[in-house]
Amino acid sequence: MQRFTCDCGNVLFFGSSKCLKCGQVVGYDPQSETMVTLRPDRGVKRCDNGVRYGVCNWLLPKSSPEVLCVACRMNRTIPELHVERNLMLWGRMEIAKRQLIYTLLRLGMKLPSKAESPEAGLAFDIISTVSNPAVTTGHLNGVITVNLEEADDTYRQINRQQLGESSRTLLGHFRHESAHYLWRRYLSNLAWDDPQRLAFRERFGDEWIDYAGALSTYYARGAPVGWEQSFITGYAASHPWEDWAETWAHYLQIIDGLETCESLGIQVQHLALALVMLPGEAGTLPSMLEQSGVSDGEFLAWLQRWMCLSTVLNEISHSLGEPPLYPFVISVRVAQKLRLAHHFSKKWRITE
């Protein structure tokens, strides 16, 4: 996340709606990618979900006929707001969703809503299992569904413990499901022998393995012994599609984490750490893709910066008596998968 400041010089945060120093109403403008104060000369207005419900701090052009920001216009279904608890949980959901959209837009990806582009667009259904017990978090044909109850910290942590996960967050759900959306949008229609499909298969496995059967096996037996050598999470070992989704979610986590730390002045060269360097092979692309030693080196340097910073975050967490903030290990195989995710993110931005 970037470092934002108010006109008065006070620090602002991504979720800020008011400057605590000067009292000005502020909001995030996705067009300029910055926080701005709502002065008459700014030419922006607040999203109606912020005005009416206090769940959004994004802005849109004052001249726009729309009343919702670009993020809120992607909502296809929202919770029943006459239930007070739903409003509180929905607010948490919207923060996580906007973080995802912020990152994808910063990567240069175009994100049309489902209403704007029925085929390539993105939409969100945020539904409570209280009103619909059959709802499950997932993705289908450009629609990401998230169970509202996941915004309840107790509910989410119970699920985390039952599933044996080291981490489970709202933002993680949105990042994970965005990978399935991007797979469908950019990869699913490519020819079987297209270099991108072949590269995906080389890194993640055969995507045509029976999905339902693979998940059934995973939930019955758990992750295979030694999964840490090839996968970023145990769930990633369940099926190539889930491996891709967990890897892409992790890629976005690293992007956000590095941007936040570096924008706040935390620089790797100032950290007194000497970590084991990843070998050069960790930064290479599959052979069927165009090779670039320069890009490989840049990726490895980027990933090494994150591994150094994440170590610091864990040490700070331990010093506070808390569990590690970053309970993951990046093996060579996982680094190679992250390298392909990085390649895809660049290609999708360029081809749009």
Image (cartoon, grey):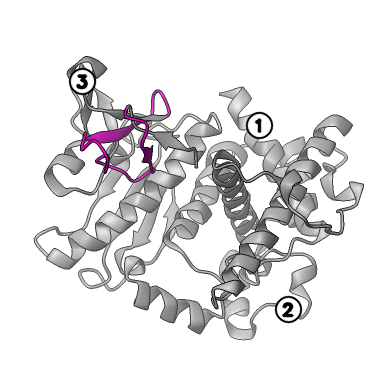
Q: Secondary structure at mark 3?
A: loop
Q: Magenta stretch?
A: 8-33
Q: Which residue is mark 2?
A: 224
| Disc on the earlier residue, 1 or 3 | 3
Note whether 268 is above or below 272 in the view shown. Answer: above
**Disc 2 residue type (three-letter):** Pro
Looking at the image, is 243 positioned above or below residue 281?
below
The kind of residue tagged 1 is: Lys
Q: Is residue 70 visible?
A: yes
| Image coords of residue 3 (percent x, y) | 47, 38
> What numbered label is drawn on residue 325?
none
Residue ID at (15%, 48%): 53
Overall secondary structure of the magenta stretch? loop
Name which residue lies at 33% across and 27% down: 7
Side of 300 where 49 appears, left or right: left
| Residue under label 3 | 62
Q: Nearer the viewer, residue 143 or 173?
A: 173
Camera-side residue of 310 and 174: 310
Q: Which residue is mark 1?
A: 346
Give the image location of residue 158, x and y in percent.
42, 81
Q: Nearer the viewer, residue 250 or 263?
A: 263
